[in-house]
Image (cartoon, helix red, strand yellow):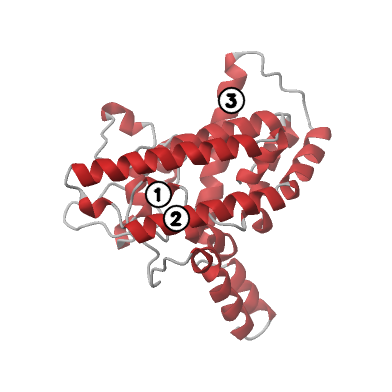
Amino acid sequence: MRGLLSVSGDHHLTGAFLLLAFAFIALEFGYGRLGGGHDMYDGREALASVGVAIGNVVAKVLSSGLSAVPFLFAYRHRLADISLDNVWSWVALFVAVEFCYYWFHRASHRVRWLWATHAVHHSATRFNLSAAVRLGWTGQLTGGFLFFLPLAAIGFHPVAIASMLALGLLYQFFLHTALPVDLGPLEWVLNTPAHHRVHHACNRGCLDTNYGSVLIVFDRLFGTFARAPRDETMRFGVKGRVPSNNPIAIALGEWWRLAVDTWRAAGFRRRLGVLFGPP
């Protein structure tokens, strides 16, 4: 998904964001230590997340053109010219990107081909800001950007789409804070750290819920919203997987398991089921 941002040449912005993210991670880590929240972070796991994040940036630089070309092609053959010289056009783009992101994120949990990349983000066993930068290296190869391609075909400029996605990613970074943040009435409309903590939990009642980016309204509308369980401690990590602090194993481990399961499946139909069925 982030590879779409290459349409606007954002590699320097990506580096700046990563440095800013590392600074906030250090602040949260320090706050937890000074405030007695020693279980907020596991040092080795946080360093592994940093390694994954650096690998993600390298992968995006090498593969970003894979999404740029389809978006420019779709926009060249757009159905209409949507001017973004008024606030309502930006509001429409924001809602449209949120809608597409919801379905992209939901599919990333329900289609194993997409989950092989997205599982990287869920592999951390501690919910904190370091988990936010634990992003897969193979997003461009799986074609996740196709969920946003209709926006360019309708008439939204690819740079505008990329900018809106970038703002959403920035917002999502802070959703991963380990601090107990409560936004009051805004919890009904916005995705918040409390909602996203549920999304990352691997408790049975938390699986496949709260897919929103900035908004939580589509989860409420389509029945995927869930609150934190009151009678159990939330657990994190990928259900049924042994955690690793090796960045390469984190980034590519699920792909290896997918390749093995596909090879062992008998017949073409079953192999398709492994690739595109649920994890």
Whether residue 113 sits left or right of residue 224 in the image: it is: right
Q: Judge left or right: residue 153 versus residue 255.
A: right
Marks 3,1: beta carbons within 8 A: no
Q: Residue at x 33, y 48 (%)?
A: 197
Would you say residue 64 is visible in this rendering? yes
The reply to whether the C-beta atoms of the residues labelled 1 and 2 are less than 8 Å apart is yes
* Whole-number angstrom distance, CA of label 2 to CA of label 3: 35 Å
> How far separated are the C-alphas under marks 1 and 2?
6 Å
Q: Is residue 273 above or below residue 111?
A: below
Nearest the viewer among 151 and 254 is 254
Asked if residue 159 lies left or right of residue 222, the reply is right
Q: Quadrant of residue 24?
A: top left
Most extreme residue toward the top is 86
Q: Which mark is residue 92?
A: 3
Which disc, if any, is residue 49?
2
Is residue 269 depicted above or below 185 in this figure?
A: below
Residue type, mark 3 in image: Ala
- The residue type indicated by label 1 comes to Ser
Provide residue 44's location: percent of width, then percent of height: 36, 61
Q: Residue drawn 70% across and 47% down?
A: 64
Q: Which mark is residue 47?
A: none
Kindly identify which residue carries mark 1: 130
Residue at horizontal 74%, vertical 42%? 68
User: Disc count in the image?
Assistant: 3
Task: First in sequence, mark 3 or 1: give its number.
Answer: 3
In this rendering, the answer to whether 50 lies above or below 173 is below
**Of the image marks 2 and 3, the number of the one nearer the N terminus:** 2
Apparent side of residue 214 relative to residue 141 in the rendered image (left or right): left
